[in-house]
Amino acid sequence: MADFETKITMSADDDKKSEQPSIVVPMDDLDTVKSDSPHTVDELAQELATIRQSAKKIAIIGSRNLPITHQQMIETLTTALVMQGNTIITSGGSSGTNAAAIRGAMKANPDKLKVILPQTIGQQPSDVQNQLIGVPNIIEHADRAMMTLADASRVCNREIIDDCNQLICFLSHTSKTLHNAVQYAEEGHKVITVFYLD
């Protein structure tokens, strides 16, 4: 708590005492911004500018193992985001988060959907290939054809995050790959919304 001090001064015109209060505030109590602070003013300004953008590129990724009610929520959320003018970036998937995001975006405006695959369309299961029919903007990666799906998916998540302003992720506390993706987004100073499913 700051120390307060009152000074008594004598008036030159008369001998009356007058009180002139003054406050002494210790300078070491003031908050300072350290140069190694994780959030500099520039980073915070960038995040605020992203939030205020009327149309953003929003990545939606998450677990494949979702109950139908969660899938319906993701689908509805994605439809609403596209109707507001946002572009949705996700990956392929026959079920779960990515599939729900694709369905939601396709309902609202297929041109506002970008699907980045971990490998090629031909390497996807037939139900994923069927779901991608009509999607106008699909990015394939033949260069990852020899990678395991898990490794290709990790690289794919990073590519999706690099391309977005904001990340929405649906995951459980045990989802190591998705936790790594969220951490990567934090390092890239993306706006992040995480929904835990457990």
Image: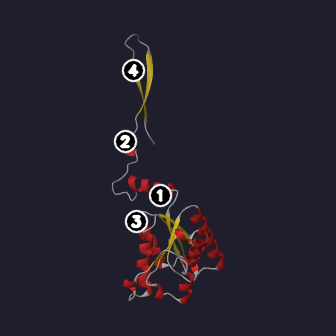
Work out how far the residue at label 3 is from the one at label 4, CA to CA, in angstroms: 59 Å
> Which of the two marks, 1 or 2, is nearer to us in this view?
1
Q: Of the residues under marks 2 and 4, which one precedes in the sequence?
A: 4
Q: Nearer the viewer, residue 126 or 8?
A: 126
Residue at 44%, 86% (x, y): give it: 149
Task: Using the rendered image of the protein, determine whether residue 49 is visible from the camera's viewpoint.
Answer: yes
Q: CA distance from mark 1 to mark 3?
A: 13 Å
Q: Amino acid at mark 2?
A: Met
Residue 144 horizontal/vertical position (percent)? 39, 84
State the residue position of label 1.
50
| Image spot of residue 167 (x, y percent) | 49, 67
Q: Quadrant of residue 29?
A: top left
Residue type, mark 1 in image: Thr
First in sequence: mark 3 or mark 4? 4
Secondary element at image label 2: helix
Q: Which residue is mark 2?
A: 27
Point out the tag, 1 or 3, that comes first from the N-terminus.
1
What amino acid type is highlighted by mark number 3? Gly
Which quarter of the rendering shows the C terminus? bottom right
Relative height, residue 188 to residue 28 (above, below) = below
Cβ–Cβ below 8 Å for labels 2 and 4? no
- Secondary structure beneath label 4: strand
Residue 132 drawn at (x, y percent): 54, 81
Question: Quick one: which residue is furthest to the right in this view?
Answer: 69
Q: Are marks 1 and 2 in contact (CB under 8 Å)?
A: no
Instruction: Tell which circle, 1 or 4, labels the residue nearer the N-terminal end.
Output: 4
